[in-house]
Image: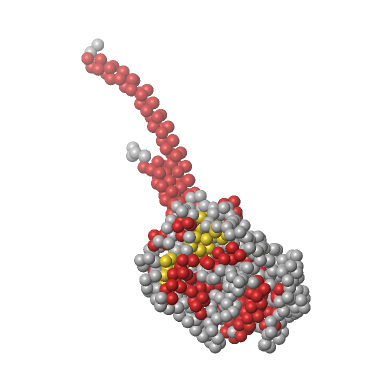
Amino acid sequence: MSRTHQRSSRHAGQRDERRPAQHRSWRHRMRRNRYATLIGALAGFLGLATLLGTAFGATTAAPAAQAPAAAATPNANCTLTVPANPLSAKGLSTPYQLSATDAAQGPCNEANVNQSAFVQATVVDPATGALSVYNPLVIDKGTKAAAAPVVPALPAGAVVGIWFGFNGNNLTLRSQRNSLAAGGCVNGSNGSIFGQFAYCNAGKFFAAANTAQAAGKLTVPAIGTGKDGKSCLTTRDFGLVDQDQSDNVTSDYLANANGQIAQKTAANTAAMVGSVSLLNGSDNLLLTAFVDPALGCTAFTAPDLANPGQQATSLGLDEIQAAKAQAAPIALVPLNDPMVQVNAKASRTKTNLYRVGVGQARLGAANNGDPLAYCKSLSTLGAQRIKADQQFFAAAPSPQAGQNLFDFLTARLAASLTNLNCPQAAAPGASASASASASASSSASTSASAVASASGTPMMSAPASSAPASAPASVGASAPASASVPAAPSVPAKTTPARPSPVVGSATAVAAPMMSAPAPASAPASMAAAMSPAPATGPAIGIPVSATSQSAPRVVPAHDVVPQPSAVGTVLGNAATMPATMTTAAGAATRSAAPAASAVRSAAATGVLAKTGASSTTLPIIGLAVSLLLLGLSAFLLVGRRRPR
């Protein structure tokens, strides 16, 4: 065989040996290409689906299925964790944390106007007598503030008093690293909390302020004279007080759309565009933001340590001025105030603890907290002052949307007499009634039913209606007469229990004084007489404490309506220290009621997912990124892997 033939045969054999291997490699490549094609097609399909879903979700409102959650009754019992060393600059600037007292009742959120808690501090410099105000921040537990709180510059030896307010029912203080004891915090007495009110170091603060006044270091401004020619009102004037005087504070906060909270300062207001202002429904806010402007009076203010160059009001300032300037008769917390009762019975111990917290004298022989005397002064002097200032109040706004201040105060007074179990709330032969009205003028009003919660702290419902105006019979000539009058109530008997130690906060819920079922608020005949043009001689107070065995239904004063949050910068009136908004949306927030439409947007409205925390602004971005990633993978597998032949 020739060499050429041998080489040819050998090459042919080699080709034959390579053919099976090449065939196997080709089949393997085909199989891999099929897999890549399938994966690419699947990735492309998922990418397109994600892209379409993102586009649809970004332009679609919150699902209707989430609506019931937003309308659910919020938890009215919350706990506030007090930071360590609360009286120090660091403690004041550390946010307080809000949480549910009982998680089974639902969460507590500071941005929910029906659950908002508030903290307010007033500072006195013993060396100079100078006063200042600082509003510590409250945030939801486990969250961060929208803006870091300002650290206050406290003078050496500063004496700090702290007060708390709450828009729900019962606020329980919880200690953090012995903070309640360090701050001298008082939440109530012997297992019975006050409800919406608490304080820290208040007794020492008022003592230091009194010492500074006695030494001539602190000069408290006179209350002045109003447009009516009378002395301006204070928190101890029967023309202003209600069933639970000197409760809650004047603090207000900013809340953004994500529910994060910040101090109300000029810097934060400018930075947090679109935020809303959260307010605490309180006697003090009623005085400084509504009554004072209506009468041309000026509120007592001091420098705001969180807001340089600005002045602020506070509960502490109001009480210092009231103690200095209020003429007799002076309204002091009585034994029938629901916040100082224990299981609907009078408690001298709890009353004294509350009085210490607002700078009032303890119960004594003359100053004995007599419920009957308090009721008499409230139903006569209080009604007369409101009537005397009708022309000013009728032209002024109130915390209740669409209701003038005169109607608001009239309804509030009628409800207070009922809640205090005053004999005047159901005087025999009464023929006139007043319901809590909601009108923009004295000629247009609504009816409102005031209700009380089972926990003992007020709730109020005052929806607008087109019913005829309802007011005390003697206020308007055409006021309708009442068809029925509730049975005469009994006044809680005085008791002198053994003095237990003050409650300084607890992680467990504590029952507040019980209240009975809701009932309509009727204006007593004695109040109507006091508000009539003719001089009022006052009703006879002759019903003994044990005259009836069943307490009359309690009704909530209208002041407990919480001013709605609104856009920052809407200022009403001319008070320099007034909160940013005093105008409220129709149907003001009610205690233990669903959040109003104008409140901070709920999780359902903003698309916030409870488990992930993602919001409606971040979800479209994430969806778009995922869809582009999948489409890119699909393009690579379907096109990029193919080689040119």
**Which residue, as the protein is rendered here, is positioned at the far left?**
3
Where 454 sits versus 568, above or below? above
Q: Is residue 579 left or right of residue 481?
A: left
Q: Which of the 4 quarters of the picture holds residue 410? A: bottom right
Coordinates of residue 385 in the picture (x, y in percent): 61, 82
Q: Nearer the viewer, residue 369 or 115?
A: 369
Location of residue 145 by image quarter: bottom left
Q: What's the image's color scheme?
A: secondary structure
Looking at this view, is 380 or 292 the one in front?
A: 380
The residue that appears at 51% across and 80% down in the rendered structure is 325
Image coordinates for residue 211, horizontal then vertical, percent:
43, 72
Picture quadrant where residue 554 is located: bottom right
Q: Looking at the figure, which quarter contains the C terminus?
A: top left
**Count of numbered badges drawn on the protein:** 0
Q: Residue furthest front?
A: 365
x 57%, y 66%: residue: 352
User: Is residue 40 visible in this depiction of the protein?
Assistant: yes
| Residue 151, x across and y down, in percent | 38, 63
Foreground of the two, 200 or 586: 200
Picture quarter with the N terminus? top left
Q: Is residue 631 visible?
A: no
- Identified at 36% across, 67% down, the residue is 155
